[in-house]
Amino acid sequence: MEPSHKIRVCVAGATGWAASELSKGIAATTDLELVAAVARKTAGKNLNTVLGFTSEKNIPIFSTLEEALQIPCDVLIDYTAPEIARHHILTALHKGVAVVVGTSGLSDADYDEIGRLATEKRRPVLAVGNFAISVVLLNKFAEMASQYMPHWEIIDYASDTKVDAPSGSALELANRLSKQQAVITIPTEAVQGEKATRGANIGGTQVHAVRLPGYVISLETIFGMESEKLILKHEAGDSAKPYVKGALLAIRKVNSFTGLKRGLDQVMDF
């Protein structure tokens, strides 16, 4: 039996690599309804036709979110670019729409602004650096390890075409680990040679970004103590399917709170 009210969803960046797979995932559910999409290059077309859905339902594609939100929806999920996503999130909040953020590259300053508006409007924003369940677990395990192993660094791997560095996954992890503050034996300013090779200090964690062909997204946290180390690593394959399950969970859970939350585990039961 279908629910009496489906959660109406708008996807921004709907024809992209991850969002197109998610759009197909939404269409296959019984409790979610994809009502509109934003994708500038295919604006004016039917998302069903563009992505090859089996459904005959018309899902209109718009060039702007303002146009798309003329169709009533409950949740916006954004898979665009940082500067576009920031505008989309603020626009959706002003319209009273809950937001799930799948876009990486937004800064802490961006999230400060978003958090203030979400609180003011009493609407939810769930920002997720990576929807893969393995990344959620990596974050959780890394937070646990940081309480007992005070030295750690993050290595962020992605393809050579990824323009933002570090990735949203690495930023989210660094943000979580900042609660403990890593011990850095030799501060960057005391390093002899090329200081930049020590990476960027983000919230007290040294983060290194590798961009090479052959990678999709990988995330590694290395914890070190005298005579021992712990390595936690997530490796993504070429398919976007692992991200769909987490994104669907985020859409279903986002209206369970108000304000800003960062991380899928914030709406999961552990």
Image (tube, rainbow, N blue to C red):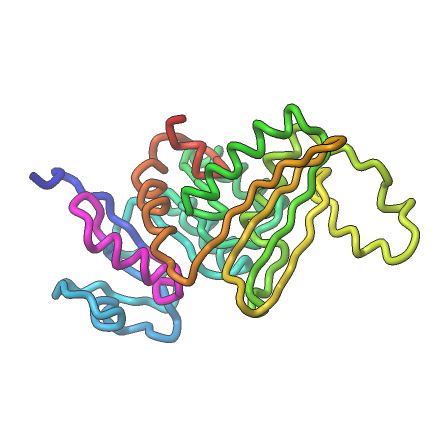
Question: Is 191 situated left or right of 32 in this image?
Answer: right
Query: Is 151 in front, or is 269?
Result: 151
Q: Is residue 223 above or below residue 217?
A: above
Q: Quadrant of the N terminus?
A: top left
**Magenta stretch, residue numbers:** 11-33
Question: Is 35 situated left or right of 1 in this image?
Answer: right
User: Residue 167: which quarter of the image?
Assistant: bottom right
Query: Is 153 in front, or is 42?
Result: 153
Residue 205 at least partly seen: yes
Query: Is 260 in front, or is 90?
Result: 260
Total numbered badges shown on the rendered structure: 0
Which residue appears at 63% of the width and 36% of the height? 230
Q: Does residue 227 belong to the magenta stretch?
A: no
Q: Residue 3 in the image: x percent, y percent?
A: 13, 38
Residue 12 at least partly seen: no
Q: Does residue 28 belong to the magenta stretch?
A: yes
Q: Residue 157 in the image: x percent, y percent?
A: 59, 57
Q: Is residue 16 above or below residue 176?
A: below
Question: Is 206 situated left or right of 67 in this image?
Answer: right
Going by the picture, which residue comes out furthest to the top? Answer: 148
Q: Residue 81 in the image: x percent, y percent?
A: 51, 61
Going by the picture, which residue comes out furthest to the front? Answer: 227
Which residue appears at 19% of the width and 53% of the height? 28
Q: Quadrant of the C terminus?
A: top left
Q: Is residue 26 above or below residue 43?
A: above
Which residue appears at 55% of the width and 59% of the height? 83
